[in-house]
Image: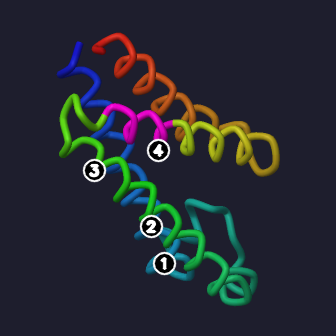
Amino acid sequence: MTMIANALLALVAALHIYFLVLEMFLWTKPLGLKTFRLTPEFAQASKALAANQGLYNGFLAAGLLWGLSQGVAGQAVQLFFLGCVVVAGLFGAATVSRKIAFIQALPAALGMAAVLLSA
């Protein structure tokens, strides 16, 4: 179960690194516009906000990777950051798109379950 927990942690961290790149560097580029269904005008106007959002996603990824690097001793850190991701995903699902629950919150919730089962 530890291997599954570690794989899910790594997946969630990788997703948040991807979100960081999308929001900080690709927000006004074709991939960012398509991913977030933005007009070029809105993307340009909200570019600074998106970069800030991307930075927070980077902090989540860093925390997850930090917890992962600690092994069993890092389970409290892992659970904390996975919990943060679940809350962020549920908030995004409630305020932006239900799809966020499946892309962000579900993998983190599965990761939390795997971490708890591996304890």
Q: Earlier in the sequence, mark 4 or mark 1?
A: 1
Tell me residue 56's x, y (percent).
53, 66
Q: Which residue is mark 3?
A: 65
Q: Residues within 10 Å of mark 3 (few under 14, many from 20)?
A: many
Q: What residue sits right under mark 4 in the picture?
A: 81
Task: Pinpoint residue 18: horizontal percent, then vertical percent.
Answer: 39, 59
Residue at image position (71%, 82%) is 46
Mark 2: few/some/many CA within 10 Å (<14, 14-19, 20+): many
Q: Is residue 103 magenta?
A: no
Type of the residue with mark 2:
Leu
Residues at marks 4 and 2, CA–CA distance in whole angstroms? 16 Å
Q: Residue at x 30, y 15 (%)?
A: 119
On screen, residue 95 versus residue 16, left or right, reads: right
Depth check: give the residue in front, 83 or 31: 83
What's the magenta region? Answer: 75-82
Q: Earlier in the sequence, mark 3 or mark 2?
A: 2
Return the residue at label 2. Answer: 20
- Mark 3–mark 4 Cα distance, whole angstroms, equals 10 Å
Closer to the chain start, of discs 3 and 4, is 3
Q: CA distance from mark 1 to mark 2?
A: 6 Å
